[in-house]
Amino acid sequence: MLRFRRVIGVLICAVTMTTLVVGCGPNTGKVTGKVTYKGAPVPNGTISFVSSSGGKDAAPKSTRTSSEGDYMVKDLAPGDYKVYITTPKKGGAASLPGATDPSLKDMMPGATKSVEIPEKYAKAETSGLELKVEKGNQTKDFPLE
């Protein structure tokens, strides 16, 4: 009986270790980069990634660009994505999604600093921006013209 328990214990350890080793590493991708328009950073924009394959990953995964145009988006499933980018219209915080009160601009530092980009970049269907996401970390800059 003691030998049987020992064998079972060794098997459980072997299966657990195999699962840990094989399962190590993320199954998703993290993308970082910079968005520029005519060479200048695009601050306070929103960059969104939409899976080209649809399905459960069809909902856009979005993040904001920094004051220098830098962005980072995590937990993207590997695959092909269409990318679109929006920026606040002139007028600052009042033009940000969900911000209808102009007095909110005081609560959103830097929100008035923005660069208007062509409207074609605001939709996945018209932006022409695409990315193949792979497991792990990768960098992709989006120089807009």
Image: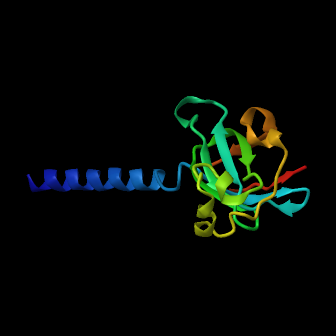
Instruction: Tell me: residue 10, above or below residue 133.
Output: below
- Depth order, front residue of 23/142: 142
Q: Position of residue 13 (x, y in %)?
A: 30, 56
- Name which residue lies at 52% across and 33% down: 56
Depth check, front residue: 1 or 26: 26
Q: Is residue 31 visible?
A: yes
- Residue drawn 72% across and 53% down? 88
Residue visible at 10% across and 56% down in the picture? 2
- Residue extending farthest to the left is 1
Q: Position of residue 4 (x, y in %)?
A: 15, 50
Q: Position of residue 90 (x, y in %)?
A: 77, 55
Residue 141 in the image, given as x and y percentages of width and height:
79, 56
Residue 111, placed above or below residue 20: below
Q: Quadrant of residue 130?
A: top right
Quick one: 142 or 97, which is closer to the camera?
A: 97
* Left or right side of 72 for 140: right
> Which picture quadrant has residue 59?
top right
Image-based side of 12 in relation to 141, left or right = left
Tell me: residue 90, above or below residue 80.
below
